[in-house]
Image (spheres, rainbow, N blue to C red):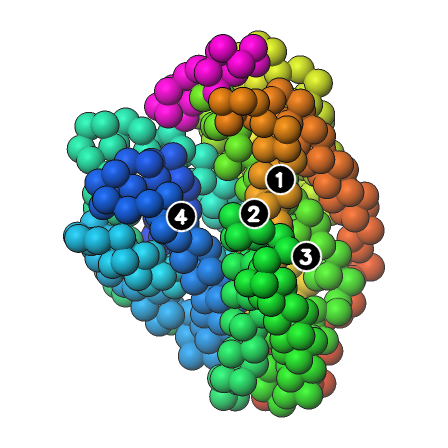
Amino acid sequence: MPTASRRPVKGDHRLTFVVLCLGVTSFSLLQSMVNPVLPTIQAALETDQETVTWVLTAYLLSASVFTPIIGRVGDKVGKERMLVVTLLALALGSLLAALAPSVGVLIAARVVQGIGGGVLPLTFGIIRDEFPADRVAGAVGTSAALLAVGGGLGLVVAGPLVEALGYHWLFWLPMAMTLLAALAAAAWVPESPVRTPGRINLRAALLLSGWLVALLLGVSQGRDWGWGSGRTVGLLVAAAVLLPLWVRAEWVSDSPLIDMRMMRIPAVWTTNLVSLLFGVGMYALFAFLPQFLQTPELTGYGFGVSVTESGLLLLPQSAATFVAGVVSGRLAARHGSKRVLVAGSALSTLSLLGLTFAHEQVWQVLVATLVGGVAFGLAFAAMSNLVVEAVPRSQTGAASGMNANIRTVGGALGGAVLASVVTAGARADGLPVESGYTHGFGVLAVTSGLATLVALLVPTRREAEPVDLVDEVRHPEAALVAAAPLVSETR
């Protein structure tokens, strides 16, 4: 009996997966490692607090712009090619940051690093193209969980790394990892078998960049500038004007950057709404929980731990996230990604309720964050799998990139809201009162509860729209490209 003909590949899918995980981990570490050591960077580069916060803001804005754009470009010109380009940009940005003689150069380097946001949608697209069907859910789940794991590990390793070697190693280490991943990707990751024909819609890219930057900049800087200031209001108004213009431009385009018809698929828009609400809770918690743990004991509620100790206290959360992400594929195969998402969202709500009502002892915080870690791993994996399952292969990068971006927008909104709640009614010494954190954790519990309710609305795979048929009607030439590997395997 003749064997099925297969397209030649550079390497085994397991080796490809190792390369992809290395790239995702490098990017996720850079998301959080800098946060705890901003005062150290401020002192070393002789700048002020307002300026040094741009080290975080510049990275956030750049990643939000490049994540969906690079995902879509990968769909069109080849995911493996764009993965190498993205990893090299991330390595270059890390090199510039490690050598930066001033805060201005460091901020510019962080903009370059933000290009690395494209690693996640490219990773999901490559997994869907290259992996056996029964391995896709598990691989997507693990790589998605690594994003949350890296965010947690960054908080853990930042303190010891800076104390032992200096803050420059916050960039040397990711640079070495991404450079290695780029070389390995060029050598072993196969070329993309599925590509979407058509040009890159530059007008849509500019409009997308415009409303994202205006929204995120206004939200992230609103507290410092003042929510009623001209700059904040102007940026939020600009975002409100540019967003519908972008939607209109994409809707009428023959070659959309983000296909609005795809975004209307029930499984896509409901999952994206869960991502927005989940991002509010998760990223805000990452930002404020270390601060809560480091609050001096004299306040009556803080634990007075160091940066390193607070990171170690959060280490079990990262471990739980990774384990949950690894097993999520098996759970999804048995019970469906929707049920995994509902379970993850519900556990997140339980974790945040625990922090709201019981945070007087260290063990209480550890239990709550451990449950939260399981929730993050399950939910991240399920959201990514639901989006990948709901869209045609030719749209995987764009859809995954937009889903990740919506989570980032949620994180920015959550951080701004939580900062306002926590700092309301501060003590005479400037430290937050305990009720600020209690109310803040309560607000996050409410948003996580809403995410659970929305997750219940996500259609199951049987209920979902047959999106591949829809895509064939809109882009018949893309459907032929996507079908080519299947045809060859039947010969």
Question: Which residue occupies 17% across, 53% down?
Answer: 101
3D distance between C-alphas at marks 3 and 1: 25 Å
Q: Which residue is mark 1?
A: 420
As for residue 310 lying within the magenta part, the answer is yes
Crowd rating for badge 4 (residues with CA inside 10 Å; few <14, some 14–19, many 20+): few
Q: Position of residue 200 (x, y in %)?
A: 49, 84
* Precedes in sequence: disc 1 or disc 4: 4
* Precedes in sequence: disc 3 or disc 1: 3
Q: Disc 3 vs disc 1: which is toward the camera?
A: 1
Q: Are marks 2 and 4 in contact (CB under 8 Å)?
A: no
3D distance between C-alphas at marks 1 and 4: 17 Å
Left or right position of 302 against 446: left
Q: Which residue is mark 4?
A: 50
Q: Which residue is mark 2?
A: 223
Q: Which residue is mark 3?
A: 272
Left or right position of 203 against 56: right
Crowd rating for badge 1 (residues with CA inside 10 Å; few <14, some 14–19, many 20+): some
3D distance between C-alphas at marks 2 and 4: 12 Å
3D distance between C-alphas at marks 2 and 1: 7 Å
* Precedes in sequence: disc 4 or disc 3: 4
